[in-house]
Image (tube, rainbow, N blue to C red):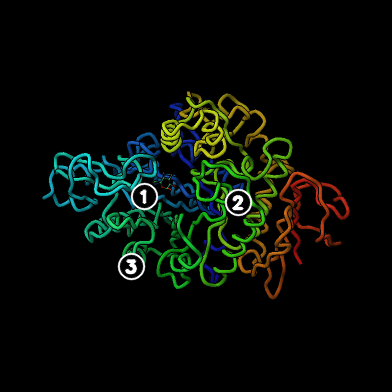
Amino acid sequence: MSRHPWWKDAVIYQVYPRSFCDSNGDGLGDIPGIISKLDYLKELGIDAIWLSPVFKSPQDDNGYDISDYQDIDPMFGTLADMDALIQEAKKRGIRIIMDLVLSHSSDEHRWFQAAKQSRDDPYHDFYIWRDGEPGTPPNDLQSAFGGSAWEWVPEVGQFYFHRFSKKQPDLNWENPKMRRALYAMIRWWADRGIGGFRLDVVDLFGKIPDQKILENGPKLHDYLREMRREAFTAENLVTVGEAWSATPAIARKYSNPDGSELSMVFQFEHIVLDQQPGGEKWDLAPLPLVQLKQVIRRWQKELEGTGWNSLFLENHDLPRIVSRWGDDGRYRVESAKMLAMLLFGLQGTPYIYQGQELGMTNARYPLEDYRDIETLGMHRQRKALGHSEEDILRSIHAKSRDNARTPMQWSGEKNGGFTTGTPWLKVNPNYPQINAEQQVGDPDSIFTFYQTLIRLRKTNPVFRDGTFRLLLADHEDIFAYTRTTDRAQLLIVCNFHGKQIENPLETAEKAIACNYSGESVPGKLRPYEARVYLR
Ligand code: GLC
């Protein structure tokens, strides 16, 4: 057996179930739909699927509001479908990673239903309650989707705390019974053959709202170590912690190689650079490339040998990377491949978000076509603050979470082959030009390029082990680095922009992969050109 855990060599693919594949024509993706596409994922070469939540949920936040952790929402299928997915994936060497939302539940969870009936109910203390007067919340903490984070419940004469929508009451991690109930649920899933868990907003578990401490509370890492001991007992589980607030020092705790907490951290420092300093993601700013390089260098160096990172550019909360940092017009194919190569050369576990492997792009819809609770909340708030409709829409087109949530584009057929019914969110009208059917088997497609990168990672340990060195740190257009072991070296050179430039790293060696076919231009890098060399 290899001395490396499997997930250090793995590539993980994120499926957003409601937008992946609809098997029954109701316009919503479902588990049988996912099963029908496992061969596609196998062909891509991935090792595991991170499945965004399919648990029972009123879908206030598209499943990130769970009303029963041990059942499947009927819109996605049944527990039997879930078992079939686990088995069918296993046959193809693919593990399933469930998305556990443990910082809060749905207000429709039976625990909360009981908790809000009476202060004496045993479940009352599963949530965070504070006394007060109606209309005067305990403090001014705001919910991430707009409005106060405190909601009054007349039956008990108290407020409960909700970091997200008021249909997402926060669980009280101080309560050992609550924690034990979660651990038992996790073991129940592991027994069904689940390969691992992604932990939603893990940095919020130890919150102390009274002191306005939300992230990184003093007991957070105690809870994680306890959870590791009591819940993640099955062998070979991968555990991934979503942590917007992680620094490299904190990440070393989460992903300590001694295995005392989680396998890896999923942090965002690199992906929030294109916003105005001190502003929100909606306050757009161009990407400062030199700063991006510094951030990536810091994470690579500071976790080397002491932690493990997730590598990603997209997920269900982020816009499409080719529209964001590439060029989704003329150089869509080149820039999507360049960004893929940049990412896949780094140390960590790469993630592909559904459609990224096709170079799917942001949607630019009129407001009435958006569904996301965060997007609509921001629109309401900014309207009230006097922002112009035009400005708000510009931010939505750039950053709305729905950009990534438009249905998967499988073919040139109606609705991109996603559904025979009416899709819950409009399919991006560019599906006749951008779809899986057209790209699988095409040697020049983005899909094939991802296949190549996955294969390269699997056959060359330097991708897993090599130490990182940034080259040309101050160059405004080139992102280049090496990864080195005592046996091999990778050199990755990416022209980040849409113009032809001088190549100070020109070499006579032959690249093992490049995003242009045919002869190179001597001494130059073409627009978005990316090359990887192995020596
Ligand atoms: C995470 C999820 C996001 C969700 C939020 C609340 O950030 O990725 O989609 O809205 O947590 O659960």
**Occupied quadrant, residue 213:** bottom left
Q: Residue furthest left?
A: 120
Q: Residue at x 76, y 61 (%)?
A: 533
Label 1 and label 3: CA atoms lie apart by: 18 Å
- Return the disc, 2 or 3, that comes first in the chain's sequence: 2
The residue that label 1 is drawn on is: 101
Secondary structure found at label 3:
helix
In this rendering, does residue 494 appear at all?
no
First-in-chain label (1 vs 3): 1
Query: In the rendered structure, which disc, 2 or 1, sits on the residue that comes first in sequence?
Result: 2
Q: Residue at x 20, y 50 (%)?
A: 130
C-alpha separation, residue under disc 2 versus residue under disc 3: 37 Å
Mark 2: which amino acid? Gly
Residue 530, position in %: x, y? 74, 52
Question: Is the CB of the residue bearing disc 2 within 8 angstroms of ligand 1?
Answer: no
Quick check: 532 left or right of 239? right
Left or right, 531 with respect to 409, comes to right
Front-most of 446 and 288? 288
Whether residue 220 sits left or right of residue 306 in the image: it is left
Gap between marks 2 and 1 measured at Cα: 28 Å
Q: Which mark is residue 222?
A: 3
Mark 3 surroundings within 10 Å by alpha-carbon count, few (fewer than 14), some (14 through 19), many (20 or more): few
Q: Is residue 186 visible?
A: yes
